[in-house]
Amino acid sequence: MKKKEIKKLTKTQIVENIEKLKKDLFNFRFQKVNGQVKSPAKINETKKSIARLKTMLEVKNA
């Protein structure tokens, strides 16, 4: 996700997106183990998106 997109989200939307991305990351890890990963870059991109969302969540809570 882009920073501009994240800034427009509410706290509940951020939390929902974090949960969705965590599930996606979990599935990517299983695909990696089984050799079914189509795009390995998606794993790192998902991790970075989770980090960005968590950062914005902390900023909005402050």
Image: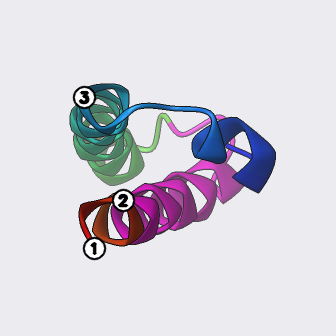
Q: Which residue is mark 3?
A: 12
Q: Point out the stretch of residues depicted in magenta.
A: 37-56
Q: Residue at x 55, y 66 (%)?
A: 48
Residue 25 drawn above or below residue 38: below
57 and 50: which is toward the camera: 57
**At label 2, which amino acid type do we have?**
Lys
Q: Residue at x 71, y 37 (%)?
A: 5
**At label 3, which amino acid type do we have?**
Thr
Q: Residue at x 23, y 43 (%)?
A: 26
Q: Are marks 1 and 2 in contact (CB under 8 Å)?
A: yes
Decide if residue 61 is on the left or right side of residue 5: left
Magenta residue check for 43: yes
Crowd tier of the residue under label 3, counting other residues whose Cα lies within 10 Å: few below 14, some 14–19, many 20 or above: few
**Label for residue 60?**
2
Decide if residue 56 is on the left or right side of residue 44: left
Q: Are marks 3 and 1 in contact (CB under 8 Å)?
A: no
**At label 1, which amino acid type do we have?**
Ala
Q: Are marks 3 and 2 in contact (CB under 8 Å)?
A: no
**Label for residue 62?**
1
C-alpha gap between disc 3 and disc 2: 11 Å
Q: How many marks?
A: 3
Q: Quadrant of the C terminus?
A: bottom left
C-alpha gap between disc 1 and disc 2: 5 Å
Numbered disc 3: secondary structure: helix
Magenta residue check for 20: no
- x then y, percent, for residue 55: 41, 71
Dot 3 or dot 1, earlier in sequence: 3
